Image (cartoon, rainbow, N blue to C red):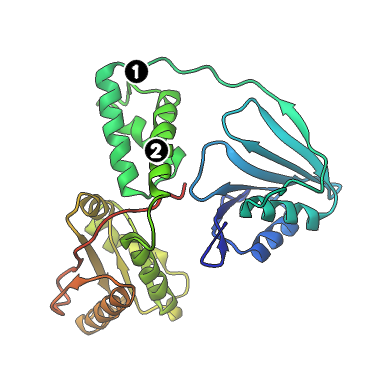
Amino acid sequence: MEIDGGLAVKVLTESGRTHARVSAGELRALVERIGGADDHFLVVQRIPDRPRVFIQTARDEDGAYDLQHRTGSVPHLWVTRVSDPGLVAEVMVRWARREDGWDAGVTWEREEFGLPEEPPALAAEVAAQAEGHVRELLRDGYLGIDAMIRETVYLLEDGEGSSPLSPAQARALVERLWLEQVDEQEAWTGPTDPDRLERAFAALEDAGIVARENFTCCRGCGMTEIGAEVDDESAVHGFVFFHHQGTRAAAEGHGLSLYYGGFDGSEQTTTAVGHEVVAALTSAGLSTEWDGDPGKAIDVTPLEWRKRLVG
């Protein structure tokens, strides 16, 4: 399966860097590259992520690849050893595309292991609170499974940092509700408004405007921290972002406020950047409310918030 020419996967490397929706050629290059310092393995997950469904490979000192895949919450992996990086890459690309017979060409062996014990059931009140938090985070749509687990445990902590929800209990809840949302979004047709927003932000990035979704907790923190997102000052002339609170407001049906400006601090630059942002949003099929005042946010409204989970 491919999305806009890219594979519907994300690739996690040993360095911690994530590559989303890579092309087949880019995935092959990543496979062939591994083996250097702090770059011995990579893990490929589907978009949207399905818990414990992945294919991964590691390269040893002899240059051979250990290739493994798992099909969900089952007590085993399928493993093989391959010397040809081209074959490893080809198998992984076929897996990413969900091709029939994707696993052909190598000899797989089944490696058994135990599954963790089921966590104890939650008290009804704790379960209701936790589920409410998880459903809000799912509607927001930006956190992956592991981050959502950590956030849910944190949100139930008392003033002393103790939580009635263990990570194992949170995982069981998050994964169940995550899969419900994944199944629901499979019925969504065409681009959603968050898809359009993502495309507008990508276009702005290409035009030299630092564009960040779901960035920091609030406007003040965003305005303070956006400068740290700049790698090459000569390549950018402005910024735009919305923050976590704005995401939640959009998910609750209240539209979305965007904050923008130029790095020189002038009203003239801020106004010019604002017009670029509005033009990109309009081109992507979104409506805005803004009167050209550089001191006012750009409101994206109306907005139907159906954010696709990635993981």
Camera-side residue: 283 or 97? 97
Q: Secondary structure at mark 2?
A: helix
Q: Is residue 2 left or right of residue 236?
A: right
| Mark 2 nearby-residue class (10 Å; few <14, some 14–19, many ≥20) | few
Q: In which quadrant of the rendered view does residue 25 lie?
A: bottom right
Q: Residue at x 57, y 36 (%)?
A: 52
Q: Secondary structure at mark 1?
A: loop
**Quarter occupied by the N terminus:** bottom right
Q: Amino acid at mark 1?
A: Leu
Q: Residue at x 82, y 45 (%)?
A: 106
Camera-side residue: 294 or 108? 108
Q: Using the numbered discs, state the Cα–Cα distance from disc 2 to disc 1 in whole angstroms.
A: 20 Å
Q: In which quadrant of the rendered view does residue 56 lie?
A: top right
- Name the residue beneath numbered marker 2: 180
- Name the residue beneath numbered marker 1: 122
**Taking the image as drawn, is residue 143 in sight?**
yes
